[in-house]
Image (cartoon, grey):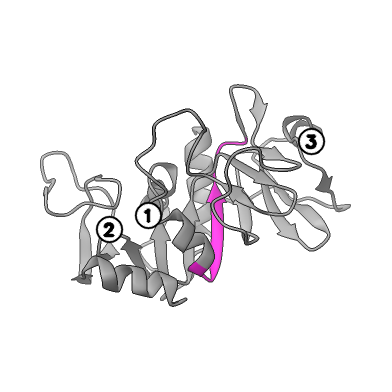
């Protein structure tokens, strides 16, 4: 199982029946593939769709039905197409139960940087700032390190997305919860030791006496 699949399967366990959930571009979009058919939720995309389904089979793509990143999606029964103003009204109005976003860095305060690397061309922040500020729950789904460099750090060196503590970090190595006291290690990845997690993490972690191995959807 790839690291990204481990992350997506673990994030899927956080989603509850009847929620309105936004999935970010890239790894977060994989989460929709691992929800059991008995769990009914509505996935929302900033470009104006409520009720996204999984990626369509090869040859069944509809160019008029995409997520915010331009990736092909399907629509579930009851799905709706809305304009951008309504879509962002839902986000900024606090009506979104959860957003799942990728991350470049998360620091000990639980602040997220995920929209740009200085010196590199980017199209803009997109909906990330609104999502982090407006969603009731913000889950960051990302690989634990990039090219050997820790992504969970004492303080973000990249531009922050929003000045608000996120809800949860899910990587292939660990599930970490930002709290008032710091970053709490809640779960270990499959077959991963606490020592491996600490070695790959740049920030301080609060390690309870018992850290269970994560269960995957």
Gap between marks 1 and 3, in whole Å? 30 Å
Count of number-bearing discs: 3
Gap between marks 3 and 2, in whole Å? 37 Å
Within 10 Å of disc 2 (Cα), the crowding (few <14, some 14-19, many 20+) is many
Relative depth, front residue between 96 and 2: 96
Gap between marks 1 and 2, in whole Å? 7 Å
Relative to 214, say whether 157 is above or below: above
Residue 188 place in picture, x, y as percent: 71, 44
Residue at mark 3: 198
Residue 176 visible in this rendered orientation of the protein: yes
Q: Earlier in the sequence, mark 1 or mark 3?
A: 1
Residue 66 place in picture, x, y as percent: 21, 51
Element type where label 2 sits in the image: loop
Which residue is depicted at the point 12% across and 53% down? 64
Residue at mark 2: 53
Q: Residue furthest right?
A: 209
Q: Is residue 86 left or right of residue 152?
A: left
Residue 171 place in picture, x, y as percent: 60, 42
Rendered image: mark on residue 32: 1
Confirm or deny contact between disc 1 and disc 2 (CB under 8 A). yes
Give the label, 3 or 2, closer to the camera: 3
**Range drawn in magenta:** 134-144
Q: Is residue 186 left or right of residue 113?
A: right
Q: Residue furthest front?
A: 119
Relative depth, front residue between 128 and 24: 128
Q: Earlier in the sequence, mark 1 or mark 2?
A: 1
Element type where label 3 sits in the image: helix
Within 10 Å of disc 3 (Cα), the crowding (few <14, some 14-19, many 20+) is some
Q: Does residue 63 show up magenta in the picture?
A: no
């Amino acid at each position: 199982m790839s690291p990204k699949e481990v992350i997506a399967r673990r994030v899927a366990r956080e989603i509850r029946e009847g929620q309105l959930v936004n999935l970010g571009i890239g790894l977060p979009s994989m989460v929709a593939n691992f929800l059991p058919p008995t769990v009914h939720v509505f996935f929302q995309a900033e470009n104006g769709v409520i009720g996204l389904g999984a990626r369509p089979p090869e040859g069944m793509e509809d160019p008029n039905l995409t997520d915010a990143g331009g990736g092909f999606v399907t629509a579930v029964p009851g799905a709706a197409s809305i304009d951008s103003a309504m879509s962002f009204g839902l986000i900024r109005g606090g009506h979104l139960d959860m957003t799942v976003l990728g991350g470049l860095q998360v620091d000990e305060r639980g602040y997220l940087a995920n929209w740009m690397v200085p010196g590199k061309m980017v199209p803009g922040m997109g909906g990330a700032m609104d999502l982090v500020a407006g969603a009731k729950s913000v889950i960051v789904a990302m690989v634990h390190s990039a090219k050997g460099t820790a992504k969970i750090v004492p303080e973000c060196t990249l531009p922050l997305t929003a000045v608000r503590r996120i809800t949860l970090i899910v990587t292939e190595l660990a599930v970490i919860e930002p709290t008032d006291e710091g970053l709490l290690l809640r779960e270990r990845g499959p077959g991963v030791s606490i020592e491996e997690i600490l070695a790959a993490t740049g920030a301080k972690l609060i390690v309870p006496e018992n850290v269970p191995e994560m269960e995957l959807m």
